[in-house]
Image (cartoon, coloured by chain):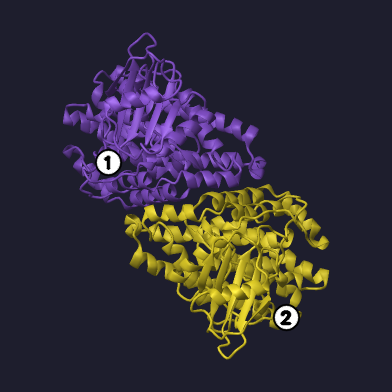
Chain colours: A purple, B yellow
């Protein structure tokens, strides 16, 4: 079958033919629940007592959000399905299970996570997730370490890196994260009340040099298989559990990029509560929780990574004194730098975050946005001076006071 | 036709069938001139007045030099032919012309360079090549800059990097350049007279940490399409001209690796004259010429690279103040580090260089080898402190005195 977009009815018929998914007598209903910008997402459920449900995710051959006529490779569905399968092997239960993949239709049939909610939404509502840091830190350590040269045969790693070559999706990041937000590009969209701050960023050559270096590392440094877009909208949570979804941007890149994405989105939420939460006690308590989470995500990552290194490293130099410490410090510096870039782009660039966008009053929103830009700049400019996660937390606290 | 090794007679018959290569009435004779370790190399010549000659290079499916039964991918012939064609486009005349490539036979038919000699041989005889630095510096700048994200579409660059994925050949470098020489591996082979120096290297954790970091960059940093094995045995010269041959190790790696290979092999020759050339005036004059050549190779590379950057960079950040300087300084530090690793491996590891091996007296040879190890260590350990090529030259001069 050659590619065509499925209707809801066709999705139901397709689902019925997949072996061992639904009982013979299932009465399947389907509804489209995606935002339709990049993909169709169908929720297909058995209305009879089995109650079983699954998700169909079908890639569209263009990007509706960016421009009517921007074509986008369907190969991203292959990459997403292969990344999900691999992530589940490396860190069982951390991602939705893939039941079936159809190359021609660019279609992934996977586990339904209707019991979970998008983490970003929960954070806006000041919810807390006691297992999140442990679960995401473990996910990061396992997926990054175990796909790197530290753990894999260098022969197999290079073949895997080639098979996860993902030029079109990487190019979206190169442009919309690292380039357009830092120059006066027509794609940018920012609150007019922060114009002065944005213009100071555009004329800050020191900052732009550092962003250029981080972009260069993103484009050249194939350390590990990244998720590639690990913001809190790609994380689904319950009070107890965490699932990572949507790895269509997966490729071999610098480990710090994924960790930085998690940190950036926790800190964007932190900044948003400047506008969202008028009660200072409530605000400070939740912001303290977010900083504690940033810190714990890193600590869990570091602890797990050290254990994996000590127990499973294949690299003959792994036991060389100082190597592990130096490696982790570089990852931390990258994570801080990438977090900074991602915070700034979500304020200045095309794609904003609901954390800030949901603040109705532009003046209150500007307060949060300015704080996000301030933290973002500090993370990029000061990353070379960091010696541990505590330095990151201090730097954020100092930005908040300064703001 | 499926793969089989050609006999000399079959090579002649094959050559006759390639269109527009030899006249109809050509009387072709063939002789095998390769060392037979990795490849068959046939020289095929028309004995009639056309006098035309060509080279057949056919890859063998194993490495005879390392072990009777080490299989080695024939895909390296595709990589070599594609690299030669690309290098000729980017830097016309810098490599032998490719007339024909046969995938099934892993066979490259190319320009005969019988008028040229292997540069290493000339250097042992203290010959001078007045155009070499200019020509190799230009080759390095053009092939490295023009295959990088600085000059290429990032989409096309990633596709090219994937097509030059070269795991088996890279693995030879990872093992025999970066790993085995720095631990007591059975593949090592060194002059017993330098045992103490070698053991000091093996127990120098600071040095090993730096070698580990350089190895890591070799394995992860896809900056540009490298030659991958650019020693003076892969360079053919006349008094006027320079040709680069044998890019079967080509892959996307750190630019400094190719530049470091050229520097390392000039410096191995420099060290070898400690043993080769008893007359101090002759020795010092030739060593000064070699240092001047190291310096000029870098200066030409840098000048050409700066011009290309200013005139042809596609990267939007290229005009950011400080970026070009910072980029070049990182390349210089890498070049120094890789030069250091390569010098040490040629003394301690499996594959030695004729520059040193041709010194018959083990005590005299040890003198050269010790100097090579001393310079190699300094280049690796001090590379972070370098601010220009003059610092490299000072560091070498200091090693020579210290030695």
Q: Numbered disc 2: what chain?
A: B
Graded by Cα atoms within 10 Å as few (under 14), some (14 to 19) or many (20 or more), the crowding at tag 1 reads some
> Measuring 27% from the left and 51% from the top, which residue is drawn there?
A203
Question: Picture coordinates of residue B377 (x, y %)?
Answer: 66, 58
Parent chain of label 1: A
Residue position marked by numbered label 1 in the rendering = A63
| In the depicted structure, whether residue B142 falls above or below residue B26 | above
A313, A154: nearer the viewer: A154
Q: In the orientation shown, which residue stands out farthest toward the bottom?
A: B49
Q: Which residue occupies the foreground of this view, B314 or A282? A: B314
* Element type at mark 2: helix
Whole-percent x, y for residue A300 in the image: 51, 27
Is residue A394 visible in the rendered image? The answer is: no
Going 31% across and 44% down the picture, which residue do you hit?
A72
Q: Is residue A317 above or below residue B193?
A: above
Q: Are marks 2 and 1 on the same chain?
A: no
| Residue B68: assigned label | none
Q: Quadrant of the C terminus of chain A?
A: top left
What is the x, y in percent for residue A128?
A: 38, 18
The residue labelled by disc 2 is B280
């Amino acid at each position: 079958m050659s590619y065509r977009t499925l209707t809801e009815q066709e999705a139901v018929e397709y689902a019925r033919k997949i072996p061992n998914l639904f009982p013979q007598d299932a009465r399947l209903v389907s509804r489209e629940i995606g935002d339709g910008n990049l993909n169709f997402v169908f929720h297909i459920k058995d209305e009879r007592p089995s109650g079983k449900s699954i998700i169909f995710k079908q890639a569209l051959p263009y990007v509706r959000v960016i421009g009517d006529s921007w074509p986008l490779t369907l190969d991203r569905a292959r990459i997403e399905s292969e990344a999900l399968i691999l992530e589940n092997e490396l860190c069982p239960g951390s991602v939705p299970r893939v039941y079936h993949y159809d190359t021609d239709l660019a279609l992934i049939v996977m586990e339904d996570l209707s019991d979970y909610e998008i983490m970003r939404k929960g954070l806006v509502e000041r919810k807390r997730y006691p297992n999140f840091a442990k679960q995401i830190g473990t996910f990061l350590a396992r997926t990054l370490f175990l796909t790197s040269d530290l753990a894999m045969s260098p022969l197999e790693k290079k073949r895997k890196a080639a098979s996860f070559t993902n030029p079109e999706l990487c190019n979206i990041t190169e442009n919309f994260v690292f380039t357009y937000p830092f120059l006066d590009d027509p794609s940018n969209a920012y609150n007019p009340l922060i114009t002065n701050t944005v213009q100071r960023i555009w004329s800050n050559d020191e900052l732009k040099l550092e962003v250029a270096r981080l972009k260069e590392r993103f484009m050249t440094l194939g350390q590990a298989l990244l998720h590639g877009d690990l913001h809190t909208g790609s994380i689904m949570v319950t009070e107890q559990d965490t699932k990572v979804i949507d790895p269509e941007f997966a490729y071999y890149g610098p480990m710090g990029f994924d960790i930085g994405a998690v940190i950036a989105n926790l800190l964007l939420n932190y900044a948003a509560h400047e506008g969202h939460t008028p009660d200072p006690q409530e605000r400070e308590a939740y912001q303290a929780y977010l900083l504690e989470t940033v810190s714990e995500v890193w600590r869990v990552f570091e602890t797990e990574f050290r254990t994996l290194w000590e127990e499973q490293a294949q690299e003959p130099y792994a036991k060389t004194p100082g190597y592990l410490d130096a490696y982790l410090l570089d990852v931390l510096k990258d994570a801080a730098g990438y977090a900074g870039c991602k915070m700034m782009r979500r304020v200045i660039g095309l794609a904003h975050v609901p954390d800030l966008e949901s603040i109705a009053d532009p003046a209150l929103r500007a307060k949060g946005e300015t704080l996000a830009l301030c933290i973002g700049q500090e993370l990029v400019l000061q990353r070379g001076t960091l010696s541990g996660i505590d330095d990151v937390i201090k730097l954020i606290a100092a930005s908040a006071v300064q703001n």
